[in-house]
Image (cartoon, rainbow, N blue to C red):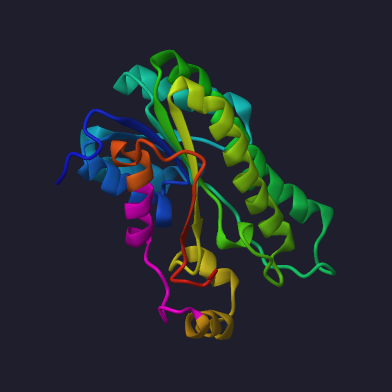
Amino acid sequence: MGNRLEGKVAIITGAARSMGAAQAGLFVAEGAKVVIADILDDDGKRLADQLGDSATFVHLDVGEEAQWEAAVDTAVTEFGSIDILVNNAGVYRRASFEEITPELIDLHYKVNQLGVFLGLRAVYAPMREQGSGSIVNVSSISGMRALPGHAAYGTTKWAVRGLTKYAATEFGRHGIRVNSTHPGFIDTVMLEENSPEVNAGISAVTPLGRKGTVDELAEVTLFLASDASSYVNGAELTIDGGTSI
């Protein structure tokens, strides 16, 4: 147990499992109150129960503006403020240009890009009123470099990178920091989208020679969310074992 987030209130999207769940658990261990936001109701409620009084669950489809309003209201009503937002929710489908459909573009856009924008807008007013806040937008190394089969997914992650820069520029004057993380080959359920051969090949070419863990990613997110990074704004941090070098 630590106190790096003592007295802070966080909303973490896509927090019912995998990377989001690891972030939620670490945040609570470091003293935060956490709103677990996800469309996976059973998993989210189960995690909130496990984390105790320091966590609560809200159903949130990040592409629906009204649901964002409800999530922010939950944070303020139940825990008293909103200090941190982690825009973690995302979808990933591999597809070549020939395989991409308008429906696949819409799916990635709504969750990965529009969802981040709506999250930024939803927390802006309460954070501006209190004069502080930290927002962490989860992009990807696909938002740093072009990868085969990632056009539908990767273009939204490039957009997250850009949204982060613009928000950091406008929000900073109100004491609100906005940064992005760029995970690489992290051991999550998203890897099930790849074949075992593809996953093995990626591990082989990663300079550290292995997949990253959700706990390693959570520690970087914690740093950006905490006051330890109080002069970090508009930054992009890669967590990829050196893949993007």
Q: As rendered, which of 226 and 2 lies closer to the eye? A: 226
Q: Residue at x 21, y 44 (%)?
A: 29
* Residue 61 percent across, percent down from the top left: 57, 38
Q: In this picture, is 39 found above or below 54? A: below
In magenta segment, residue 215: yes
Q: Is residue 37 left or right of residue 2?
A: right
Residue at 85 percent of width and 69 percent of height:
98
The residue drawn where x is 47% and y is 18% is 128
Which region is colored magenta? 206-222
Q: Residue at x 76, y 52 (%)?
A: 105
State the image quarter where residue 75 is shown.
top left
Residue 96 point in image, percent of width and height: 77, 70
- Does 84 sit above or below residue 81? below
Check the image and report above or below for 61 versus 145: above
Seen as rendered, the residue at the extreme front is 231
Do we see residue 112 in this rendering?
A: yes
Q: Is residue 128 left or right of residue 111?
A: left
Name of the residue lying farthest toward the left: 1
Q: Nearer the viewer, residue 225 or 190?
A: 225
Q: Is residue 226 left or right of residue 156?
A: left
Could you say which quadrant of the image residue 209 lies in?
bottom left
Q: Does the magenta-highlighted stretch encompass residue 84?
A: no
Residue 123 versus residue 187 in the image, above or below? above
Q: Position of residue 113 (x, y in %)?
A: 65, 43
Please indicate, yes or no, whether residue 67 appears anywhere in the rendered image: no
Q: Residue 183's spot in the image, x, y percent?
A: 49, 60
Number of numbered discs on residues: 0
